[in-house]
Amino acid sequence: MNFLFNEEQTSLGETVGQVLADHAALTGPDPSRDSDGEVWAALAELGLFSLLVAEEHGGVGLGFVDLAPTVEALGAGLAPPLIASTLVATEAVNRLGDVEQRAQLLPDIAAGETAIAIASAELGRGNDPVFAECGLHDGRLTGRKIAVAGADVAQMLLVVTRTQSAPALALVPTDAPGVTVEPHADIDPSAGLCRVTFDNVAVASAQLLGEGSPGALDTLIDLGATAQSGMAMGIAEVMLKRSVAYACEREQFGKPIGSFQAIKHRCADLAVAVEAGKATSHYAFWACSEDAEDRASAASAAKAYCGEIACNACNDAIQIHGGMGFTWELGLHRFLRRAQVIEHAVGSRAWHYERVVAETLAAREVA
Amino acid sequence: MDFTYTDEEHRFRLELREWLATALPEGWGETVFEPEDEEERYLFRRDWDKKLSSGRWAGINWPVEYGGRGATLVERGIFAEEMARAKAPESLNIIGHNLAGTTILHHGSQAQKDRFLPPIIANEEFWCQGFSEPNAGSDLASVRTKAVRKGDKYVVNGQKIWTSYAQYSQWCFALVRTDPDAPKHKGLSFLLIDMSSPGISIRPLRQISGESEFNETFFEDVEVPVENLVGQENDGWRIAMTTLAYERGPEDCLGRQVRFKQELEKLLEVCAVEPTANGVLADDPVVRQKLGRSIVEVEAMRLVALKSFSRILAGDERGPDASVIKLYWSHAAQRMNEAALDILGPAAVLSEGDDDAMAGGRFQTSFLQSKAFSIYSGSSEIQRNIIGERMLGLPR
């Protein structure tokens, strides 16, 4: 029993964090996508996209849990969400893809040449990331997805859809005829959120991921939710560090404000939340890696809880920074905005708490 | 990261599971429960402690030479899980094992170890903690109970408060002032006091739950042999800090988590059957949101404790980690208890003994009891100061 990361896992996260830190614009006050291409190239050169890919396909063959500190670094550095979605999709292809799909997709993914955006959310479905109106009938995909991060620059879309009989996952190239990608006006312009419309798009059976596998959608949800929880904790940790640093340096009434219990205690509570959230998220990464019995409930627990913690951490950080916290220049709003994107990706907090309950009650019945 | 168990750890689990199956009364947890009367319940727990000792399942982490099994942290985790699985009764001598014993193991003389450890592990001597006083709560270092050296004895005078289980204890470890002129942290000593000594009187305090687990304990010219001083005279604060590190540590959290999980299981059980206008409680989306959050937080208690365990296993010092854990579980448990009453609806106000009470009114009792969590063993405010100053480096 050991609930710590090894040196390799930790240093991987640190390295990715350093690469992101080299691109100051990522976390600057003005949301911008100007450096996204360079960031992608730098991470690809580092080999990030080959880590999850098996050696036979030109990768390193690491497990999902090995990337937990890395995904936190992506969150902390406000990296384009397309990076994490590509990692999630890679793992989905590893697990759900057939021999041909893996042989066809993984080498390009490993080389950083295929970015994959995940298209799940739709309007009119409430919080549910699973139920898709976007339908696949007679080999044709029709419907509309919203908030697809990075769809405008990705090469591939992983689409949550449904056939007459069951939910399905379709891999659709962004340049396929009938696919229209339009950027949204949204809370976090750096996230690259897009509306994607499918108008009678031809989808061959070979493009379906995990066809006939009843757990395929759950696999994607669990991987996606877990990755989002990691990014949420990256944000929460930055908020804690910046709050503490400011509380040590900012003086009022002749003392650093961190000496006042109103501030000190808020920081302490934030530190506790970060610890609890990270433990929850790390466990979810492990449960995904090991396909543990409680994988679904661990992933949903992490998504719901860490999303909540990240949103609260941003609130705390802004409050602790006082008037400065509310300024555009300080840039805390960037994290507040991104936390909202994470909160609403792959199902909201309410949906995931609900899933935890459903899983727990079902497990009780089995026992 | 690895949550799997070795063969040896697995055997440890099976051995304990088999022992529990025979040790617990037949029908335990189904038809047979702890006595309802408070006094009888404590006596029942005392007997259970003795049974644990007879199977060598008390103080498992202690070194083999003192009757323990030298259990690893992982085995302690397994122990907590299995006790929960069997819904085993709570131990009465937690203070003896986790605090008195642990402190004596760290700081006691060989003679003290030989004298005090065997009866603790045998659960023949039960312990209480004499730290808090009416004017030394969060400001623990300002204790006034004084001990004056006279020949080969200390003469102790003063008053302790919130002394849990004093009425069942044979011994008390106490923080006393031995140098009134020194700065407040530097004039304290750590004494082991025989509760049958002349001059000790106990007055039970009634808690908001109606129970009287804790007491006021008065010391009037109580004589304590100098050999019952742990460590050096006036070095008691440092020793007390060891005690507190274990009081708040991951072992404590893991044991409690198991109880909270049982509580939550009971709540789920009630929700799965309790009818509402259109189904059962567990069908209500609002109820499910509350349940969901509680499930996640109770699991997170386990995970934060395991994180801390792993850090200690990797060689980290016990530090403010313990405060993080204590602050987390105490408030998370309170939230769960609040949620339970919210969920039960109008029946939430009905208590044990009322025919219409749900689950025998236990959620109400737990709700009331939970208010102590954020106060005892260092209030939340003190934990936040420790975290803020020692972990985050915020100025005093």
Image (spheres, helix red, strand yellow):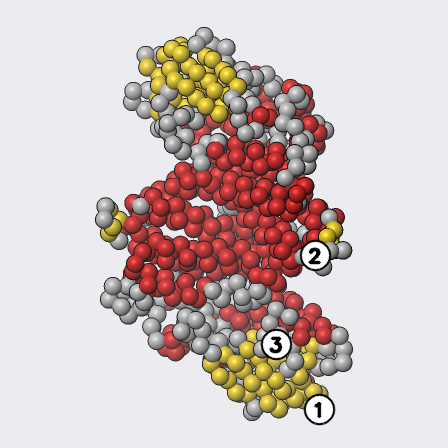
Q: Are marks 2 and 1 on the same chain?
A: no
Q: Are marks 3 and 2 on the same chain?
A: no
Query: What subunit carries mark 2?
Result: A
Q: At 32% across and 15% down in the image, what residue appears?
A: A137
Q: Position of residue B109 (x, y in %)?
A: 67, 76
Q: Are marks 1 and 3 on the same chain?
A: yes
Closer to the eye: label 1 or 3: 3
Q: Is residue A177 left or right of residue B316?
A: left
Quarter location, residue B265: bottom left
Mark 1 crowd level (few <14, some 14–19, many ≥20, 10 Å Cα): few
Mark 2 crowd level (few <14, some 14–19, many ≥20, 10 Å Cα): some
Q: CA distance from mark 1 to mark 3?
A: 26 Å
| Pointer 2 with pointer 1, Cβ within 8 A | no
Q: At 55% across and 44% down in the image, what residue appears?
A: A312
Quarter location, residue A77: top right
Asked whether the viewer can see residue A15, the reply is: no
Residue that badge 1 annotates: B150
Q: Position of residue B140 (x, y in %)?
A: 64, 72
Q: Position of residue A290 (x, y in %)?
A: 48, 37
Instruction: Please state which of residues B29 and B236 is positioned toward the viewer in this rendering.
Output: B236
Precedes in sequence: disc 1 or disc 3: 3
Instruction: Please state which of residues B285 and B74 is positioned toward the viewer in this rendering.
Output: B285
Q: Position of residue A173 (x, y in %)?
A: 49, 13
Residue that badge 3 annotates: B135
Count every numbered label the image shows and give the total: 3
